[in-house]
Amino acid sequence: MSKSVVAKRYAQALFELSQTNGQTGSVHEDLLELKKVFQNNSELEQLLGNPRLTSTKKKELLAVLFKDANPLIQNILFVLLDKKRINETVNVIDEYNALANDAAGTTEATVFSTRLLTEDEKAAISTAFAAKVGKLSLRIENEIDPSLIGGIRLQIGNKIYDSSLSGKLERLKKDLIGS
């Protein structure tokens, strides 16, 4: 999660606005996609931070790129651009996600597995581990990691639950060697 006070303020405002409009879920989903765009395209943030481009041109670019997104998403991007805080976009998204997850009784989790998990498997993992962290459910992101050999490794915040075969072998090695 972000340490930015500015990001927390913008995220709180966006969250309250989305709650008022009954759009918390759709804004949350759009923000997850927006985060991927900003993380995978560092050129976009550089372009939006370029002082040679006018604010109007930058807004036109954002309007075209995110024309299908919720209008609240476009508005927050325009505000961040106007306030010269576009570099805080990912932090705002992270803070918003934390607020939305807390309100819904969920939390983010990453499951590392050797193959893509089915929806039933994700639901079973969510059910099994949500209570351990005091939540109703987990919002699971699945990442493929062939080095696990088998099983899964689950990360929820700073907690890691490792039931992978490679993890078990590593623990057995430490037990046998004693280090």
Image (cartoon, helix red, strand yellow):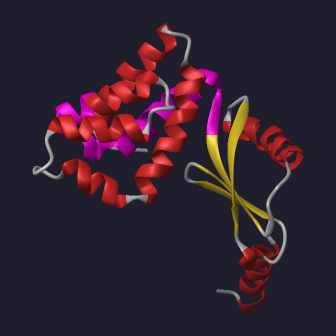
Q: Quadrant of the C terminus?
A: bottom right
Q: Residue furthest left?
A: 52
Report whether residue 5 is seen: no
Q: Residue furthest bottom?
A: 177
Residue 66 is drawn in which quadrant? top left
Predominant SS along the magenta part: helix
Q: Position of residue 170 (x, y in %)?
A: 73, 81
Q: Nearer the viewer, residue 58 or 102?
A: 58
Q: Position of residue 166 (x, y in %)?
A: 77, 78
Q: Residue furthest top?
A: 20
What residue lies at 26% left-to-right and 42% top-to-bottom? 86
Q: Quadrant of the N terminus?
A: top left
Q: Is residue 145 left or right of residue 20?
A: right
Q: Nearer the viewer, residue 21 or 2?
A: 21
What residue lies at 41% left-to-right and 51% top-to-bottom? 38
Q: Is residue 91 magenta-colored?
A: yes
Q: Which residues are magenta?
A: 79-107
What residue lies at 70% left-to-right and 87% top-to-bottom? 178
What residue lies at 43% left-to-right and 22% top-to-bottom? 71
Report whether residue 156 is seen: yes
Q: Is residue 81 left or right of residue 70?
A: left
